[in-house]
Amino acid sequence: MITTSQITDNWYFLSFRLKDDTIGNQTYDDRRDCLIDLVDSIATGKYSDDTTSSFVFRSSCSLKEIKDEVEKRINLEHDVVDVAEMNIKNSFRIGKAKQSRPRRSRDS
């Protein structure tokens, strides 16, 4: 049976790269645990964390609410998180990322 929350919840993809250093008083593990705790607290039901640094989950939170919470949990100068709302193809990049690589031609 489909519940009301399943109809109104959005699907999100969250991917992250955290610098493998202690920054301030937070280690890599501290920052990673904060992201896991965030997903635990906002996910509706089960979520997928099968890959090393990404989650797929359903939540009633808005994309902006998730972005605001992620910003509190990472070091914005060294870490980067991509979070995308899959239903409407909307996304945020949070933190300082390296310059993007140019897209490769399919012919090469």
Image (cartoon, grey):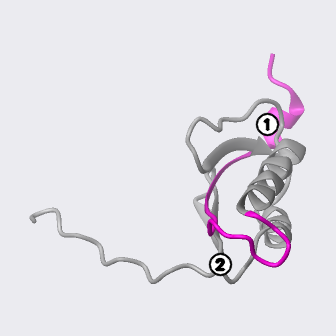
Residue 16 painted magenta:
yes
Q: In this view, does 87 lie to the left or right of 71?
A: left
Task: Check residue 7 in the rendering and tell me which mark sits there, or answer none.
Answer: 1
Provide the secondary structure element on which disc 2 rests.
Answer: loop
Residue 99 in percent (x, y) is at 45, 83
Q: In the rendered structure, which amino acid carries the disc numbered 2?
A: His
Is residue 52 or residue 67 the one in the foreground? 52
Q: Give the range drawn in magenta.
A: 1-27
Q: Is residue 63 left or right of residue 65?
A: left
**In the current view of this chain or complex, which residue is farthest to the left?**
107
Task: Check residue 21 in the rendering and tell me which mark sits there, or answer none.
Answer: none
Residue 94 in percent (x, y) is at 68, 74
Q: In this view, does 76 lie to the left or right of 100?
A: right
Residue 2 in percent (x, y) is at 80, 23
Q: In the rendered structure, which amino acid carries the disc numbered 1?
A: Ile
- x 72%, y 79%: residue: 76
Provide the secondary structure element on which disc 1 rests.
Answer: helix
Question: Which of the 4 image quarters holds residue 79?
Answer: bottom right
The quadrant of the picture occupied by the N terminus is top right
Query: How far, Cα to Cα, is label 2 from label 1?
Result: 37 Å
Instruction: Identify whether 24 is placed above or below 85.
Output: below
